[in-house]
Amino acid sequence: MPYVVTSNCQDCKFTDCVEVCPVDCFYGDGRMLYIHPEDCIDCGACEPACPVEAIFPEEDVPDAQRDWIKINAERATSGDLANVTEQTEPLPTAAAKKASLGL
């Protein structure tokens, strides 16, 4: 089962997870990252690297966040997003979002 990025990533776009991903399965838009479900090899390296605890194995996505499974699949496979393969600066709103999450 692939890993899934959830709403904690919105308006953060920390890319620590991208740095540790061995298969470059992350895609991004202006607000967040998504994991391509077919490219993810389920290694789990990204989950502990996420500073806002936004990444879960598909089977462990919290009930209130289950819609993100479909969103990741749709967005990452749309062909409209850039493949994010290198760490970049987080969004200017990232520190405030992280604080609002209590992290």
Image: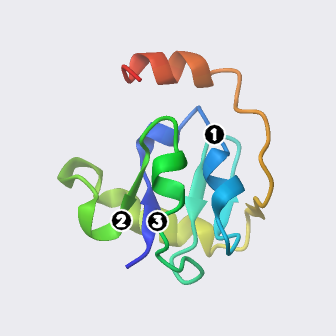
Q: Which disc is residue 76 wearing?
A: none
In the picture, measured across the screen, residue 25 lies left or right of residue 53, that is: right
- Quadrant of residue 40 within the rendered picture: bottom right
Residue assigned mark 3 = 44
Q: Which disc is residue 57 wearing?
A: 2
Q: Are marks 2 and 1 in contact (CB under 8 Å)?
A: no
Give the answer, above or below, for where 45 lies relative to 11: below
Q: Earlier in the sequence, mark 1 or mark 3?
A: 1
Q: Nearer the viewer, mark 2 or mark 1?
A: 2
Residue at disc 3, secondary structure: loop
Mark 2 is surrounded, within 10 Å at the Cα level, by few (under 14), some (14 to 19) or many (20 or more) other residues, namely some
The CA span between labels 1 and 3 is 18 Å
Give the answer, above or below, for where 11 lies relative to 15: above
Residue 86 lies, in percent from the top left, at 80, 54
In the picture, measured across the screen, residue 20 lies left or right of residue 50, that is: right
Residue found 65% across the figure and 58% down from its top: 20
- Quadrant placement of the C terminus: top left
Q: Amino acid at mark 3?
A: Gly
Q: Earlier in the sequence, mark 3 or mark 2?
A: 3
Residue assigned mark 1 = 13
In the picture, measured across the screen, residue 3 lies left or right of residue 28, that is: left
